[in-house]
Image (spheres, grey):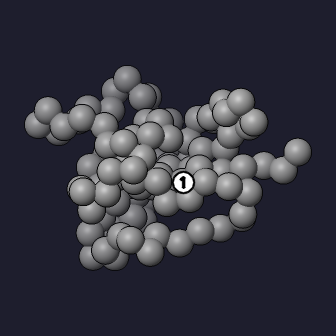
Amino acid sequence: MQARSFVVSNRFHPPISPFDGVKLYGGADEYTYDNFGNPNIPAYYAVFSYDQVPMYSTPALIHFSTEETLVIEGVDQEEVELQDGDKPQSAGDDSMR
């Protein structure tokens, strides 16, 4: 079985699930581009692997900005706080971009 990836971006916090942000890609390719984001606006990116069920892995996380790019390690999903009552974005919601 070929590995599958699900890539999500979120401007406000590291995505804690595959549905907590804007879906950029889902499939078996080895790369993707964020053609919708503004490179001048910092964003968090998460890559989840998934199987046929689908069951999703713990994400690989990165924070991108024009000043620096940081790999984020060991994020506890319960510790991610949403800002000012924000709710997690759905995968199809690009209104926050």
In depth, the one of 78 and 22 nearer the eye is: 22
Question: Which residue matches tag 1?
Answer: 7
Q: Residue furthest top?
A: 78
* One can see residue 68 in this view: no
In the picture, the quarter occupied by the N terminus is top right
Where residue 90 appears, as percent x and y from the top left, is 36, 42
Q: Is residue 18 above or below residue 68?
A: above
Q: Residue at x 31, y 37 (%)?
A: 88
Using the rendered view, name the quadrant where residue 85 is placed: top left
Where residue 61 appears, as percent x and y from the top left, is 50, 49
Where residue 15 appears, as percent x and y from the top left, is 41, 43
In depth, the one of 85 and 70 nearer the eye is: 85
In the picture, the quarter occupied by the C terminus is bottom left
Q: Is residue 91 above or below residue 54?
A: below
Q: Residue furthest front?
A: 92
Q: Is residue 26 left or right of residue 13?
A: right
Where residue 86 appears, as percent x and y from the top left, is 19, 37
Q: Is disc 1 placed on a helix, strand or loop?
A: strand
* One can see residue 94 in this view: yes
